[in-house]
Image (spheres, rainbow, N blue to C red):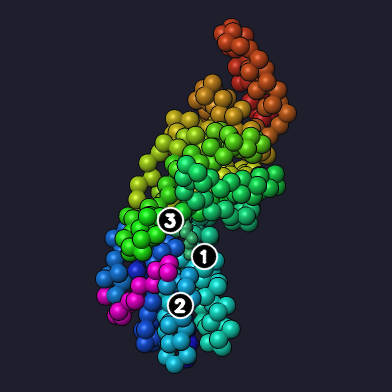
């Protein structure tokens, strides 16, 4: 007898693998875990049941966190499938379940699938250069946990990107309903990219260790792996006010970027007017300088040099930036500075 833990992927009911579908079809009972993640908007339990040819038993938070006792007992005498959105190892809850099953000598077979942990690569940042993932929970007036800040700090000190997984509140009770033992649940809530960016900035304000700021480059993503997936890059401040639509959302705080990563990043840039003539592949933290130069003269330079991009990894680039910045709105000096810039543009090409 086997307990199959089957990853469903991120898209819709059809993202299940052939191996996963075979496990489901051969199982006497099929459970669906549906509180740590969601499939695409139009995927309903009915559609899943029709496609898998099986009735699904819904496993909510209480079911999973209180031990899944019944399901584990059943797995001793019949094949059972436990379906998880994403990959079975994409959430810590499922690791606990698998350990418990092993302790009871139940044979467990895992069927892997795509997870948000690897699908985030679609924004062009290298999966190899991500640091620790953080979870961002909904703040309340009195509860603003900030332990994530230290992890973002160590990631950024090492130049690594940080994936932020965002809170999901399903089947939550108000304290009053809980105290009165009333099984009345609040409507589901899913944290948005905007809320995540706001909370990050709020904690930077409180901690003040300059781990990141409004200008830090970030990626907002929604419904990854689904037909209407959305990836938008910009500064943390820009992402506070962009509507990403339906859940689920994820957020990335960029670390240092390789020039290939920056190219990809720019292709998702919210501010399309900003052409990014200058790309700096050494240190994305110098974004402010690049942004300023782009705004000042990016278009002119692109037109003049007929190059799609100019790379700013030399000391000449730094010198020009400092020169232009020091001109304090003196138009004539600025014009001279710009013409100097045009003259040495070859030296700052890659
Ligand atoms: C606890 S994790 C579960 C991950 C899942 N088990 C997996 O392997 O993908 C749930 C969080 O991942 C992120 N997430 C999951 N699927 C997503 C998707 N398709 N698009 C964007 N974010 C997603 C959201 O931040 C969501 O709140």
* Residue visible at 45% across and 43% down in the picture: 195
Which numbered disc flags the more N-terminal residue, 2 or 3?
2
Determine if the C-beta at disc 3 is less than 8 A from ligand 1.
yes
Picture quadrant where residue 313 is located: top right
Residue 237 position, x and y percent, is 49, 34
User: Does mark 1's beta carbon lie closer than 8 Å to ligand 1?
Assistant: yes
Label 1 belongs to which residue? 91
Residue found at the far right of this picture: 315
Q: What residue does disc 3 label?
A: 168
Residue to which mark 2 is pinned? 68
Between 243 and 127, the residue placed more toward the observer is 243
Image quadrant where residue 49 sits: bottom left
Q: Earlier in the sequence, mark 2 or mark 1?
A: 2
Are the two marked residues, 3 and 1, in contact with CB atoms closer than 8 angstroms? no
Q: Is residue 133 above or below residue 62?
A: above
Q: Is residue 70 visible?
A: yes
Task: Measure how far apart labels 2 and 1 are at the Cα level.
Answer: 16 Å
- The quarter of the rendered structure image containing the C terminus is top right
In the rendered image, the vertical position of residue 46 relative to residue 170, given as above or below: below
Residue 39, label in figure: none
The span from disc 2 to disc 3 (Cα, nearest Å) is 21 Å
Give the spatial CA distance, label 3 vs label 1. Answer: 13 Å
* Left or right position of 188 against 142: left
Q: Is residue 29 left or right of residue 93?
A: left
Tell me: residue 302, above or below residue 198: above
Element type where label 2 sits in the image: loop
- Pinpoint residue 227: horizontal percent, then vertical percent: 35, 56
Of 156 and 280, which appears nearest the observer?
156
**Upstream in the sequence, badge 3 or badge 1?**
1
Q: Which residues are magenta?
A: 50-62
């Amino acid at each position: 007898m086997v307990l199959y833990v089957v990853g469903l992927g991120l898209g819709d009911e059809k993202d299940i693998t052939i191996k996963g579908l075979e496990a489901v079809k051969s199982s006497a009972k099929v459970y669906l875990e549906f509180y740590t993640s969601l499939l695409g908007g139009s995927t309903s339990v009915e559609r899943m049941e029709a496609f898998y040819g099986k009735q699904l038993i819904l496993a909510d938070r209480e079911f999973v966190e209180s031990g899944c006792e019944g399901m584990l007992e059943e797995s001793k005498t019949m094949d059972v499938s436990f379906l998880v959105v994403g990959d079975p190892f994409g959430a810590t809850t499922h690791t606990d379940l698998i350990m418990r099953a092993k302790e009871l000598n139940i044979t467990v077979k895992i069927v892997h699938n795509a997870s948000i942990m690897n699908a985030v690569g679609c924004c062009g940042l290298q999966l190899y250069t991500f640091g620790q993932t953080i979870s961002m929970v909904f703040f309340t007036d009195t509860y603003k946990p900030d332990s994530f800040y230290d992890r973002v700090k160590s990631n950024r000190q090492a130049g690594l990107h940080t994936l932020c997984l965002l809170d999901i509140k399903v089947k939550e009770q108000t304290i009053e309903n809980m105290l009165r033992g009333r099984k009345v649940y609040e409507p589901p809530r899913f944290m948005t990219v905007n809320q995540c960016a706001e909370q990050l900035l709020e904690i930077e304000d409180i901690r003040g260790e300059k781990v990141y700021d409004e200008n830090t480059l970030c990626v907002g993503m929604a419904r990854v792996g689904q037909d209407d997936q959305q990836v938008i890059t910009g500064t943390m401040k820009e992402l506070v006010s962009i509507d990403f639509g339906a859940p689920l959302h994820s957020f990335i705080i960029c670390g240092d970027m390789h020039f290939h990563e920056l190219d990809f990043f720019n292709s998702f840039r919210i501010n399309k007017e900003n052409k990014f003539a200058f790309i700096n592949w050494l240190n994305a933290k110098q974004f402010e300088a690049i942004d300023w130069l782009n705004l000042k003269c990016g278009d002119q330079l692109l037109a003049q040099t007929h190059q799609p991009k100019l790379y700013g990894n030399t000391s000449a680039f730094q010198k020009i930036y400092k020169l232009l910045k020091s001109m304090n709105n003196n138009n004539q000096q600025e014009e001279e500075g710009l013409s100097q810039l045009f003259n040495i543009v070859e030296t700052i090409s890659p």
